Amino acid sequence: MGLRFTYFPTSTLPRLHSIVWCRIPEDDGSPGLHVRPALVRSTKRDPTTNRGAVWVSYGTANLNIPKSNAVDLVIQNYERLRQLGLPHAVRFDLGLFNWPS
């Protein structure tokens, strides 16, 4: 049995810099087990199929910044976390991103 996807109207695509909740894909492309926050970096629409996609950077509760040259966005201010609906401090690795299908 193949993967089944639910497509929402492209009018519901999130805005740039929104926080959305999604499952980080497994290596085979199937949805992962855990729902995580993701930062919307861009969106696109295919007018021929009327499907849309979002370009996201996934968030992690691991605030340890790697020693690489990664660019991270860390949200840890209590008021900002509350405004964004995040339950705890989150680090978004802006060097890692994905166009989930």
Image (cartoon, rainbow, N blue to C red):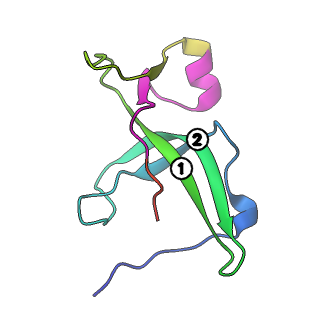
Asked whether, in this view, residue 36 is left or right of residue 14, the answer is: left
User: Which residues, given as a range, are shown in magenta?
Assistant: 80-97
Q: Secondary structure at mark 1?
A: strand
On whether residue 90 falls in the magenta region, the answer is yes
Mark number for residue 41? 2
Q: Residue at x 45, y 31 (%)?
A: 94
Residue most toward the front?
Answer: 69
**Mark 2 residue crowding within 10 angstroms, few (<14) / some (14–19) / many (20+):** some
- State whether residue 52 is above or below residue 93: below
Rendered image quadrant of residue 71: top left
On whether residue 3 falls in the magenta region, the answer is no
Residue most toward the bottom?
Answer: 1
Q: Are marks 2 and 1 in contact (CB under 8 Å)?
A: yes
Depth order, front residue of 85/58: 58
Q: Quadrant of the N terminus?
A: bottom left
Q: Which residue is mark 1?
A: 55
Amino acid beneath label 2 = Arg
Amino acid beneath label 1 = Trp
Q: Secondary structure at mark 2?
A: strand
Asked whether, in this view, residue 5 is left or right of residue 13, the answer is: left
Q: Residue at x 25, y 15 (%)?
A: 67
- State whether residue 23 is above or below residue 96: below
